[in-house]
Image (cartoon, rainbow, N blue to C red):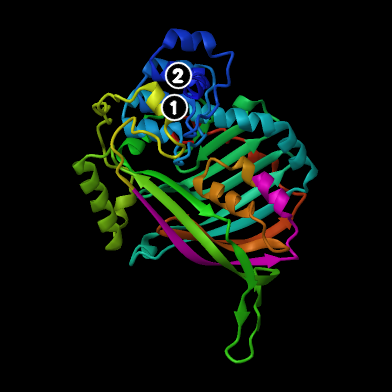
Amino acid sequence: MAENSESEKYPLHKCVFQGDVKTLSSLIRTYDIAEKDKQGNTPLHLAVMLGRKESVQLLLAHGAPIKVKNLAGWNPLAEAISYGDRQTISSLVRKLKQQAREQMEERRPNLVATLRQMGDFYMELKWDFQSWVPLVSRVLPSDVCKIHKSGASIRMDTTLVDFNDMRWERGDISFIFNGDQKPSKSLTILDNRAKLFQRETELEIEDEVDILMSSDIMAAQMSTKGITFSRAQTGWIFREDKREMVGPFHADFYQINGMVLESRKRREHLSEEDLQKNKAIMESLTKGNSQGFANGEPHVRRASLNPPPESNITWEEYIMAPAGQCPLLGRNLVYKESSKSFKATVAMSPDFPLTVDMLLNVLEVIGPFKHFSKLRQFILMKLPPGFPVKIDIPILPTMTAKITFQEFAFRNDIDPQLFQIPSDYFEDPMRFPDL
């Protein structure tokens, strides 16, 4: 009897598992589309793992969440990459971007009100990327981001357009958020070299899909459970707490203890050729050659993979499996996990005119840039008192970033033209396909 009640507990999951699209369609508004079963899988997880394309599209049309992770720590997009159906991956990437925008719109009224209450300012952040892989540090970029804030508008100027494991793109770009504009016009990216601009629209995402299909599926997170802070010491014989100036700000230095970057990767979807190509890029980097990071090489669109063998697991076998022991529904996993401890420091200043909460609101706006989302994640930790004017943050398992808030001033003379698109710039909706 218990077995039967367990089997009936998740009707949407059951419809997906059994490929019953008709019943799924009739039940989808009645039940919680985001509900997790014992394995932490949502109906969308199961649909992509089992290659149920019609169910995937139906669930996406009803707003099934994509960011949610199962007990093994993977979201539906990771499982879709493993399965290898290009159309499904594209649909999930597009929906993920749409859901992120919708969440931003929900928070937008509060965000705009908070920005208005803040004084107008100019701020500079310096990024220095470093790696423990020999010779890689010398080809890693550094960047000074300049941020202007006026009313409900923010402009960020940067030279680091994008990066991931093995590529980055340099340029001269400006990111403008105008809180007063309607949502479709509030975010604009300028390419100042090419004199182009792009508003945030439903963009072509096929380049991103190619990268996802040809790279490791990565899940990396900073474990903050065991983190403690201790005062950094200076001096050989007479030890004392380290205090230094960071730019114009007095700062107390703290050692961050117990910072661990936990990374997990899967590569069951990659061919031998993919692995060789990725290895060659990494090897060229370790020899100090930055060409591995270029985005310029032409490539053919990735085709869908042959689907994995059909699962012969029954619904009852799946739903009765103990939590954390999910039967294999897709490809055989090729999986590796590692954790790396980082020695890091943070310099906290009581003098800095901005508060951490104010900074979080600014970072909320410039979230599309991957490295800024890492900075936001770090600042959400319980830090010592003051403002973090200098921080070491693990960005990737092989790379850390040192961020210095080297300049800050409240100003009432910020030029409103900074938040306008120059009249000689042309619109190119495809300039930044990833953003």
Q: Residue at x 52, y 54 (%)?
A: 222
| Labels 1 and 2: the sequence-earlier one | 2
Q: Residue at x 51, y 24 (%)?
A: 2
359 or 10, nearer to the observer? 10
As helix, strand or loop, the secondary structure at mark 2 comes to helix
Mark 1 vs 2: CB contact within 8 A: yes
Question: Is 343 situated above or below 160?
Answer: below
Q: Is residue 56 magenta?
A: no
Question: Is 342 situated above or below 38?
Answer: below
Horizontally, residue 280 falls left or right of residue 260, namely left
Q: Residue type at mark 1: give it.
A: Ile
- The magenta segment: 336-362
Residue 158: in sight, yes or no?
yes
Q: Calculate the distance from the C-alpha at mark 1 to the C-alpha at mark 2.
A: 9 Å
Q: How many marks?
A: 2
Residue 205: image x %, image y %? 41, 29
Q: Which residue is mark 1?
A: 319
